[in-house]
Amino acid sequence: MQSGCAIMHSANWDDLRFVLAVVDGGSAKAAAAALDVDHTTVLRRMSALEKHYGVKLFDRDQSGYRPTPTCHAIVEIARSVSHSVAEIEQKILGRHRRLEGRVKLTTTDTIYLCGLEDMIAEFGTLHPDIVIETHVTNSKLDIARYAADIAVRPSRAPPQWLTGRRVTGLSFALYGATTEFAKIDDPLTEQCAWVGLGEALAGSPAHGWISDNVQPERIVLRADSFALVPAMLLSGRRLGIMPCCMGDSRDGLMRIGPVRREMDTFIWVLTAQGHQSPQRVRTLCDFLARALRRRKATMEGRP
């Protein structure tokens, strides 16, 4: 059996692309869509790789493909290779053709406020002739009808007409004002008010968790945007659910209890299935995927 580093030395880049696609997509079907191949091709390549190197790359269960420790070691190195390849391609392209034009991007307020705004600004300095039109909304724009070129959105499983990369997790926790909750035993038994979530966030795992765990009469405020929740929590003795990337960075708020893993979801960079995106769109997708992965710990509520 070979180690991850040994495999990296002997594997070709095409093999590694398949491994990365399965890790990012979480399934053979998602990887096939990202690589524009049949999903049976992905299955054959993964099986052949495991047989050739004598290692197990993925544990397969009903939830999809879970990378083994060996696979994690390969992926860590493969990502650096991927970034280098992308940089080389960009330098070659830059010598012959300057990227320009408009890209329509849609995302949620949470992702925009948790770093995407800065990422877009950084991309603008690298590609000043690309104009990014950003639509921040908790409604789902129809990418299939070209209302947007790229969607950066949270989802446990994106619709089948979209394809892309799962770039990081997005975790949630319970928060309250530091001045009000210096000590609290069990937030679910405390007789205090709650901030609920409105219908605009009905698809969020947090909305479902509140519906299942909080008595309706204890909800005194509702927000259609996570961006509104901090002000509601700071104005009284109230509890609420927030993405960790927002709650942990807000002065005056404290996380109450651990990250609520039952609400975990993922952030995806998505485009329309079956549509050949122009180079400027692919370049922005690659840039955002790398930038969001660098914020993985923050998005997942880890130190």
Image: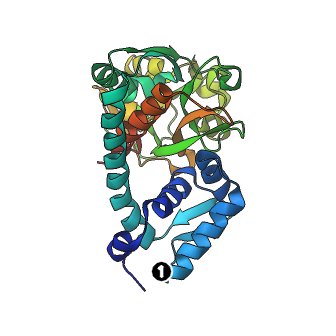
- Vertical placement of residue 261 versus 40, above or below: above
Please give the name of the residue rendered at 45% of the width and 20% of the height, measured from the top-left corner.
227
Three-letter amino acid code at disc 1? Answer: Tyr
Q: Quadrant of residue 286?
A: top left
Which residue is at a point 49% across and 56% down the rendered structure image?
17
Relative side of 71 to 46, left or right? left
Q: In what element is the residue under mark 1?
A: helix
Residue located at (48% from left, 29% from top):
279
**Residue 52, percent from left and from top:** 52, 81
Q: Nearer the viewer, residue 156 or 268?
A: 268
Q: What colouring method underlies this structural image?
A: rainbow
Q: Is residue 53 above or below residue 184?
A: below
Quadrant of the drawing holding the N terminus: bottom left
> Residue 289 placed where, x, y %?
43, 39
Query: Does 166 appear above or below 6?
Result: above
Spot occupied by residue 262 in the image (x, y as percentages of width and height): 56, 49
Along the line of sight, the residue nearer the viewer: 210 or 298: 298
Residue 121 as seen in the image, left or right of residue 109: left
In screen coordinates, is 157 left or right of 4?
Answer: right
Q: Residues within 10 Å of mark 1 (few under 14, many from 20)?
A: some
Q: Position of residue 183 (x, y in %)?
A: 33, 40
- Give me the residue at 37% from left, 43% from top: 86
Residue reaching furthest to the front: 96
Q: Nearer the viewer, residue 184 or 111?
A: 111
Residue 188 is at least partly visible in this image:
no
Residue 58 seen in the figure: yes
Q: Which residue is mark 1?
A: 53
- Between residues 165 and 41, which one lies in front from this camera angle? 41
Q: How many marks?
A: 1
